[in-house]
């Protein structure tokens, strides 16, 4: 049962082969057994999970179920869920029990009838690429427990990779769905900016943040995206578009698909073993009838510098809300209002979050705003324009998701710049607001390698189609870590 | 560009984060490395390029000025560090 896809689980529930309570208990038992070492979950609440499962069983019995009703899912702890501790992996919110549901949570649980298995570990406020900035300790990669799972959605990735959950949600501001998906052998999708509501998703960089699915397969991602996406009046950047079935094109043949290979993604800077797996995957696509064309993203080398101005600037503004007044941590001792703010924030935030707030405050401050913030926004437009140009000669863009496989715990933790460069291939996508995926495409020294697929705006169905056809021709996505029985 | 510990203290004050001299010194090394990375932007000629604030070009939606949400003050204040009579309590700011 733990190996099954969403579609298979839905069929098993509909056929009464298993109840949602039984299925949920199965995964909760696995979490109880394996999570103490992997640390993929921050919060597990058996009673709340089983209550949701009982409600799902009632819906199934009343024939009021949808395709996902009764299926368990792990929720990244960045999504506010009513009655659940929602920490964002920060001391600042360690005791915050959300009084309301994020739209994604409401859609997946109340509407689709899925069952929450708990809240997954992540980098603090989603700021990191290794899950090591979590206040609740690092997550271990199920493929090699001395290595990171990637980040920031590292707990969600590890949970699905170790089959502690069938699927999970993630969020992606600079690669936080795709990079951990790559490092844990999962399929992850970051939708076009504005497709998934940000309401109740704790904000990091609002012009870049986007929620999305993380799962073993493209088919699972399509079904989850169907349930997660849609217009939401509560998110001022939510896009009013007709409802789409993201699974509609899964089976379409790939003959004639034009794959753009940006020469900047195939140069120096990538581990040769990762590159070999990516090249082999592109060869597989050619066998499926796709043709590759060289394209160029000449400003892509500027994406990391521009991102580390824009994202911290937005973060410094967003995180100003954590002041010890309305929710979250408040320092125990202070002698004035300002002193309370200063001590609350000094004690409540971890080192990486503070670093980014300081960068943001600096680049937005008088005298530096033009040179840093506006310059970064101008470069952002150049980067977005590169993609527009590239998509004139191709349908999808492909390349590596991450320049390396999973690195050792602690290896990059002391060197922020080295860590930031983990996202060198993923960040440009967020700056442009495009949809992109990472899919399993092979192994290097026993560790998973991810292939990144980037689509034009709203090309999710086409991305999922390309990913699904690849997954029908290969079995990389079915490989599992050795010791998760 | 290199930030001095005094400049870092000044930024930390703007961001309302208390940092000790030792922390300012330690974080300064990291911040200067990060700014070295960021400085790569300065070599790019962006004259005439319109700054891009958002991935999608859209204007903010407007709605009628009517009550659209139920009153949840009690639930929202239940998670506050300190409240009294429906108000958030903070240290005295006016003598």
Image (cartoon, coloured by chain):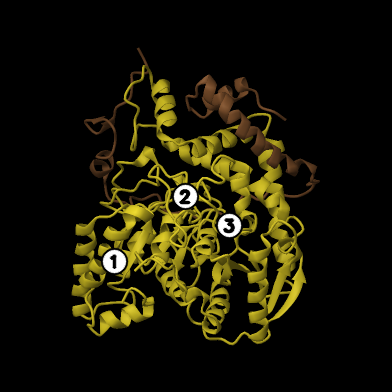
In the foreground, A177 or A40: A40
Q: Residue at x 54, y 70 (%)?
A: A439
The chain carrying label 1 is: A
The colour one sees for chain A in the rendered image is: yellow
Q: Secondary structure at mark 2?
A: loop
Q: Residue at x 32, y 53 (%)?
A: A36
Mark 2 and 3 residues: CB-CB less than 8 Å, in contact? no
Q: Secondary structure at mark 1?
A: helix
Query: Which chain is depicted brown?
Result: B
The chain carrying label 2 is: A
Q: Is residue B76 left or right of residue A154?
A: left
- In the rendered image, which residue does mark 1 sit on? A27
User: Where residue A208 sits: x, y (%)?
Assistant: 55, 53
Q: Nearer the viewer, mark 3 or mark 1?
A: 1
- In the rendered image, which residue does mark 3 sit on? B58
Q: Secondary structure at mark 3?
A: loop
- In the rendered image, which residue does mark 2 sit on? A131
Residue under disc 2 on the same chain as residue under disc 1: yes
């Amino acid at each position: 049962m733990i190996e099954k896809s969403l579609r298979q689980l839905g069929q098993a529930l509909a056929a009464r082969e298993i109840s949602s309570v039984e299925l949920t208990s199965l995964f909760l038992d696995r979490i109880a057994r394996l999570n103490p070492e992997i640390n993929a979950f921050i919060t597990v609440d058996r009673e709340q999970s089983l209550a949701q499962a009982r409600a799902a069983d009632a819906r199934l019995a009343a024939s009021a179920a949808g395709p996902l009703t009764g299926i368990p899912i792990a929720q990244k702890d960045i999504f506010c869920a009513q009655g659940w501790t929602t920490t964002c992996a920060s001391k600042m919110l360690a005791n915050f029990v959300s009084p309301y549901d994020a739209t994604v949570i409401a859609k997946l649980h109340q509407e689709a009838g899925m069952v929450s298995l708990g809240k997954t570990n992540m980098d603090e406020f989603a700021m990191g690429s290794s899950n090591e900035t979590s206040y609740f300790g690092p997550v271990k990669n199920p493929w090699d427990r001395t290595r990171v799972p990637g980040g920031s959605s590292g707990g969600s990735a590890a949970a699905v990779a170790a089959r502690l959950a069938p699927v999970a949600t993630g969020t992606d501001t600079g690669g936080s769905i795709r990079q951990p998906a790559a490092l844990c052998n999962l399929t992850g999708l970051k939708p076009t900016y504005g497709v998934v509501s940000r309401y109740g998703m704790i904000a990091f960089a609002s012009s870049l943040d986007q929620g999305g699915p993380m799962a073993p397969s493209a088919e699972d991602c399509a079904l989850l995206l169907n349930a997660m996406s849609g217009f939401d009046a509560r998110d001022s950047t939510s896009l009013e578009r007709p409802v789409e079935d993201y699974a509609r094109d899964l089976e379409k043949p790939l003959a004639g698909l034009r794959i753009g290979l940006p020469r900047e993604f195939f140069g120096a800077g990538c581990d040769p073993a990762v590159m070999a797996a990516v090249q082999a995957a592109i060869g597989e696509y050619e066998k499926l009838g796709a043709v590759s064309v060289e394209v160029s993203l000449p400003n892509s080398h500027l994406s990391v510098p521009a991102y580390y101005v824009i994202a911290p600037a937005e973060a410094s503004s967003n995180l100003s809300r954590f002041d010890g007044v309305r929710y979250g941590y408040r320092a125990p001792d202070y002698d004035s209002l300002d002193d309370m703010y200063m001590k609350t924030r000094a004690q409540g935030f971890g080192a990486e979050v503070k670093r980014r707030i300081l960068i943001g405050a600096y680049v937005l401050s008088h005298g530096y705003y033009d040179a840093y913030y506006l310059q970064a926004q101008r470069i952002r437009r150049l980067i977005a324009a590169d993609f527009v140009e590239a998509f004139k000669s191709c349908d999808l863009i492909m390349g590596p998701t991450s320049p390396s496989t999973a690195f050792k715990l602690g290896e990059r933790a002391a060197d922020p710049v080295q860590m930031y460069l983990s996202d060198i291939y993923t960040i440009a996508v967020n700056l442009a607001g495009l949809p992109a995926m990472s899919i399993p495409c092979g192994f290097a020294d026993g560790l998973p390698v991810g292939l990144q697929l980037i689509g034009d705006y709203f090309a999710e169905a086409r991305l999922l189609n390309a990913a699904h056809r690849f997954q029908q021709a290969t079995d990389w996505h079915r490989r599992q870590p050795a010791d998760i029985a | 560009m290199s930030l001095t510990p005094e400049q870092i203290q000044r930024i930390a004050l703007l961001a309302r984060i208390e940092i000790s001299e030792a922390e300012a010194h330690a974080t300064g090394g990291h911040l200067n490395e990060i700014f070295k990375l960021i400085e790569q932007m300065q070599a790019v000629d962006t004259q005439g390029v319109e700054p891009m604030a958002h991935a999608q070009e859209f204007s903010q939606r407007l709605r009628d000025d009517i009550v659209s949400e139920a009153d949840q003050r009690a639930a929202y204040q239940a998670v506050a560090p300190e409240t009294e009579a429906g108000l958030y309590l903070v240290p005295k700011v006016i003598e």
